[in-house]
Image (tube, rainbow, N blue to C red):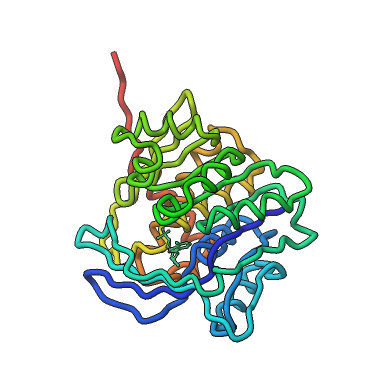
Amino acid sequence: MSLLVVGTVAFDAIETPFGKTDKIVGGAASYIALASSYFYKHLSLVSVVGDDFPASFLDTLKSKGVDLTGLQIKKGEKSFFWRGRYHNDMNSRDTLDTQLNVLESFDPIVPDNCKEVDFLMLGNLMPLVQQKVLDQLTKRPKLIVLDTMNFWMDIAMDELMKTLAQIDVLTINDSEARQLSGEYSLVKAAQKILAMGPKVLVIKKGEHGALLFNKEEVFFAPALPLEDVFDPTGAGDSFAGGFIGYLAKTQDISFENMKRAIIFGSAMASFTVEKFGTERLLNLTDKDVQDRVQEFIDLVQFDISLV
Ligand code: AMP
């Protein structure tokens, strides 16, 4: 039993209406690994950083039980860097700079003990690298979840389509679902995307929650109305980490259990946005997570009798 997380481990510089950061630790896989570590401890990471990346953050991941055998540290090279600015609504953002650096020549190597993983989380990364990871597995995982973004749809759509044909669950946001499908209606978009390969689709809608689709059903998880949202960066990745971490913990990949998993994912995302970067995810307790999930339950629970 194990979970393999693939994705960027990176530096981000973030501007929101509430403040601005210099280079801080980010990256899709950093958020995914931290979020899923609250649910599941048999976790391995495949990624790449330069030797400019802080060893202290890698130690933090190790302390959370994340096996870093598959993390390549490139001497004399720079880590992936992303700079983004959020609009006043905090739901949309502009990418101001993407420096691939070590990612440009990244050749992922899946450690031998991860070639038969049960759960695979292909975090946001170039589709060709996601594909190279799939090619190295010697047994098909029980569940493959993939996250991607408009950046890769713009420059690598053909590779992305090839990878999509091989996965089980796709997580993207609403504008990406519209871009991928060419449909404005998210219901129509979901049907088109589910015809591309994934059996299940999660459409993330920021502060408006998330939708979970398969071909027959749809389920909605709200986002928690929060008093303070400082930085939405990594919300989608924390969501994905909570989602797959919970599925791996319960070893149940039914649609019914995925409904629960998107609530856990939403809970992890709600923590991430409360502080800049990964800070809020570093020191949560199990009780914090349980209390947060209870808030979600209270938010949507009501009695109605239909006479
Ligand atoms: P999210 O806010 O969940 O969509 O993810 C934000 C994280 O994605 C940031 O920490 C970035 O380092 C990372 N990121 C931004 N652009 C890319 C990209 N093109 N490929 C992979 N990761 C990226």
Left/right placement of residue 217 relative to residue 47 reads: left
Q: Quadrant of the C terminus?
A: top left
- Identity of the residue drawn at 30% across and 51% down: 207
Left/right placement of residue 128 relative to residue 67 reads: left
Quadrant assignment for ligand 1 = bottom left
Residue 46 place in picture, x, y as percent: 64, 64
**Does residue 135 appear in this view?**
yes
Residue 178 place in picture, x, y as percent: 34, 40
In this view, the residue in front, 148 or 238, is 148
> Which corner quadrant of the image does residue 213 belong to?
top left
* For residue 1, above or below residue 111: above
- Identity of the residue drawn at 57% across and 82% down: 77
In this view, the residue in front, 246 or 244, is 244
In this view, the residue in front, 90 or 124, is 124
**Does residue 279 appear in this view?**
no
- Identity of the residue drawn at 66% across and 56% down: 4
Residue 154 place in picture, x, y as percent: 40, 52
Residue 231 place in picture, x, y as percent: 33, 66
In this view, the residue in front, 285 or 32, is 32
